[in-house]
Each structure stands twice: as structure tokens, then as C-alpha cells.
Image (cartoon, rainbow, N blue to C red):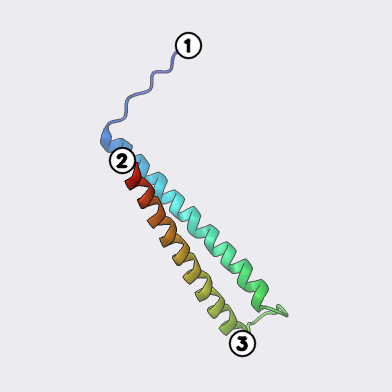
Amino acid sequence: MSLDTPKLDTNQRQQIMSSVQQQMAIQNAQEILQKLSDKCFKACIQKPGSTLSSSDQKCISQCSDRYMDAWNIVSRAYGERIKREQLRH
């Protein structure tokens, strides 16, 4: 039994790759937000309630900023490393 699959042209392949990259970026962003939420909630919220105190809000804001700053630094370093590795080969 053979499967007759049509060959994809370059444009179709590019569209599929673009779609996959977009889906991966969305998944990555969701994962980052989930980790940020978990980390900052644990670090900042001592007594969960129906509202956040101003100190809780400030803590969450600062925690989120630090987390994103650190993530951006690591992401840039990783991207630069990949570029260097690609240039070697």
C-alpha cells in the first residue's frame, strides 16, 4: 500500500514552517508566563485573598520585571551562541 502525498512547493513549505514557528512562539510565551506567575506568586503572596495589597502588587511587578530581564539576557546569549556555532560549520 502506497501513500500518494503531493509534493509541497517552496511557498507551501515556508507557510507551514511559519505557522509552526508561530505556534512554538505562542507555546513558549505561555510557558514563560506560567513560570513567571508561579514564581512571583510564591515569592510575593503570603496570604491569598480576594484583592492584592499595594505591597503585593509592587512585589509582583518587580518580580515580573526581574524574571523577564533575566529571561531576555539568557535568550540573547543563547541566540548569540547559536549564531557563533552556525558560523563555525
* Front of the two marks 3 and 1: 3
Amino acid carrying label 1: it is Met
**Residue 18 in view in this figure:** no
Q: Is residue 49 left or right of residue 61?
A: right
Residue hosting label 1: 1
**Residue 28 in view in this figure:** yes
Mark sitting earlier along the chain (1/2): 1
Residue 30: numbered disc: none
Amino acid carrying label 3: it is Ser
Name the spot of residue 75 as percent of width and height, x first: 44, 60
Q: Residue at x 40, y 51 (%)?
A: 82
Q: Residue at x 47, y 62 (%)?
A: 74
Residue hosting label 3: 55
Residue hosting label 2: 14
Near mark 3 (Cα within 10 A), the count class, few <14, some 14-19 or many ≥20, is few
Near mark 2 (Cα within 10 A), the count class, few <14, some 14-19 or many ≥20, is few
Mark sitting earlier along the chain (3/2): 2
